[in-house]
């Protein structure tokens, strides 16, 4: 089978395992065969609506197996999909639509009314229930798919932007295919594997789940979001579903470790615990390793711009709570360069920016050439041919074992519960709250929370303020602490004195 599109993995899986369950969620299950049939019918419906090539589809559906089928339907038409959260603020959806200019918006009947309030720039709004039951047209779908090439965009995932405008990371089908093969072979996934997935579909960790399971013929169990609020119940759920591996943000692992349930619930089928999206502290990891020593533990690293994961480390030794946990070495077909400020390769132990080259590198930011040019640049180590590297903005260094150690960010970008956040976007949203004259967002790394200082003559409770903020940003961007000041401190350049604010609000507490 010609692997010219990521959706070919679904064709392959449906032929090999037509009756095997692919997705298992709180709404039910779908086999590989059922997923393929549903996706191809929906694709036929999209083609009849006139969805042209390279016209992305914005998908706003609940996190479930049918949402995966919708992604595949869009790929069958030769177009990329862009997932968004069902509960995303309308103002954020408007910013995404303004940048994306989708050919169609696919959502539920209940959500259609919300999109009538937005400027859609000519995009139609389609009810998924109608689309999935469209009349089949395999001939039209095959013709469109046969015309695809593996460098076409497969998906566009929107991350936070420092100016308040989300950035659409655009990833090619080739990158997805290569990553799915790497993760399957590296971690020995197979048709008897059961993968416990936590990531929302608008988060790049979901690429590991969706396409890793497709490549391996594994069952993908979508852990209900409401269950994550009760960490002590999650191990029982994993046992019930027979999960053999999980891929979570460290926050979920930390919450389970802190619940005291580890060691009280045997999980004999669980063989691999992977984590990514934020720094994993050793103390809770050691709780996991002591309670379940037969599991393998893998620390995975990768920005959205690198198709989920590009550096990995399988924990092979003991670490004290205070030691840094390596992120490891580059995946196959990827290379990690630690570059100094003057563009040279850092020596062992010398800190520099983590820059990445290889098949995982994204195509750039959708409809944002200036932003793309800032971080997708020519490899400064040579000029003999064009080679794009991605400048991650992350700092790192190499230890005496040849392992990369993550050392923080170069800018104001942070990660909370695996969600990448630009503090500038938090500040832009705060400025939209009536009465706010100025705003400064800080990150308390110790408490893993956003602290927001605002200049205003009004008084607010945190709850009231966040109710206003939720009109502009997702819940995971809301501050956990609010400080209202008559005036924010300024430095000599008449800019907000962030150093003084940090010292006052964070270091003295």
Image: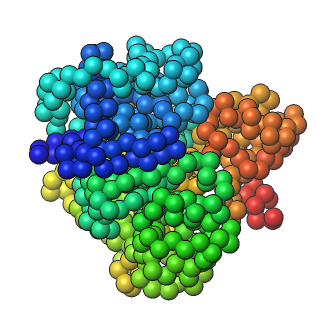
Taking the spot 48% from the left edge, 58% from the top edge, the residue there is: 241
Above or below residue 108? Residue 347 is below
Q: Is residue 507 visible?
A: yes
Q: Is residue 452 left or right of residue 128?
A: right
Q: Is residue 188 left or right of residue 428?
A: left
Q: Position of residue 399 (x, y in %)?
A: 41, 81
Q: Position of residue 144 (x, y in %)?
A: 17, 27
- The image quadrant that residue 253 belongs to is bottom right
Taking the spot 73% from the left edge, 32% from the top edge, the residue there is: 468
Q: Is residue 254 left or right of residue 340?
A: right
- The image quadrant that residue 444 belongs to is bottom right
Nearest the viewer among 208 and 238 is 238
Nearest the viewer among 424 and 494 is 424
Q: Position of residue 102 (x, y in %)?
A: 38, 24
Above or below residue 221? Residue 31 is above
Nearest the viewer among 48 and 372 is 48
Q: Position of residue 495 (x, y in %)?
A: 68, 45
Taking the spot 45% from the left edge, 62% from the top edge, the residue there is: 242
């Amino acid at each position: 089978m010609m692997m010219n599109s990521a959706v070919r993995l679904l064709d392959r899986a449906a032929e090999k395992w037509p009756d095997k369950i692919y997705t298992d969620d709180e709404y039910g299950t779908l086999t590989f065969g059922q997923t393929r049939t549903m996706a191809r019918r929906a694709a036929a419906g999209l083609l009849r609506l006139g969805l042209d090539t390279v016209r992305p589809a914005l998908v706003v559906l609940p996190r479930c197996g049918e949402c995966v089928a919708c992604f595949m339907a869009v790929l069958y038409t030769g177009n990329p999909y862009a997932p968004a959260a069902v509960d995303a603020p309308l103002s954020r959806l408007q910013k995404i639509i303004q940048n994306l200019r989708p050919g169609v918006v696919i959502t539920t009947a209940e959500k259609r009314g919300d999109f009538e309030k937005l400027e859609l720039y000519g995009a139609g709004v389609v009810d998924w229930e109608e689309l999935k039951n469209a009349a089949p047209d395999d001939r039209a779908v095959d013709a469109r798919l046969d015309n695809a090439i593996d460098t076409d965009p497969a998906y566009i995932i929107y991350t936070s932007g420092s100016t308040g405008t989300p950035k659409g990371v655009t990833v090619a089908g080739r990158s997805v295919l290569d990553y799915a093969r790497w993760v399957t072979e590296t971690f020995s996934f197979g048709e008897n594997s059961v993968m416990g997935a936590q990531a929302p579909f608008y988060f790049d960790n979901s690429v590991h789940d969706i396409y890793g399971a497709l490549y391996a013929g594994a069952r993908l169990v979508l852990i209900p979001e409401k269950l994550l609020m009760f960490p002590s119940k999650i191990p029982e759920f994993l046992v019930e579903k027979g999960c053999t591996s999980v891929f979570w943000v460290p926050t979920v692992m930390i919450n389970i470790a802190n619940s005291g349930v580890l060691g009280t619930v045997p999980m004999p089928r669980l063989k691999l615990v992977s984590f990514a999206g934020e720094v994993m502290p050793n103390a809770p990891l050691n709780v996991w390793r002591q309670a379940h020593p037969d599991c393998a533990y893998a620390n995975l690293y990768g920005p959205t711009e690198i198709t989920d994961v590009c550096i990995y480390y399988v924990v092979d030794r003991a670490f004290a709570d205070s030691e840094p946990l390596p992120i490891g070495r580059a995946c196959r077909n990827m290379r990690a360069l630690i570059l100094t400020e003057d563009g040279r390769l850092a020596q062992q132990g010398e800190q520099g920016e983590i820059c990445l080259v290889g098949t995982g590198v994204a195509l750039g930011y959708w409809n944002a050439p200036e932003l793309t040019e800032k971080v997708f640049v020519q490899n400064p180590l040579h000029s003999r041919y064009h080679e794009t590297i991605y400048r991650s903005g992350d700092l790192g260094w190499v230890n005496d074992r040849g392992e990369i150690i993550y050392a923080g960010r170069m800018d104001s970008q942070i990660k909370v519960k695996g969600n990448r956040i630009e503090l500038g976007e938090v500040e832009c949203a705060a400025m939209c709250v009536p009465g706010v004259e100025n705003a400064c967002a800080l990150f308390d790394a110790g408490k893993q929370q956003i602290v927001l200082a605002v200049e205003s003559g009004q008084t607010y409770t945190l709850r009231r303020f966040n109710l206003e903020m939720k009109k502009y940003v997702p819940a995971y961007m809301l501050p956990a602490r609010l400080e209202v000041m008559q005036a924010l401190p300024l430095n000599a350049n008449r800019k907000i004195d962030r150093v003084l604010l940090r010292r006052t609000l964070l270091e003295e507490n």
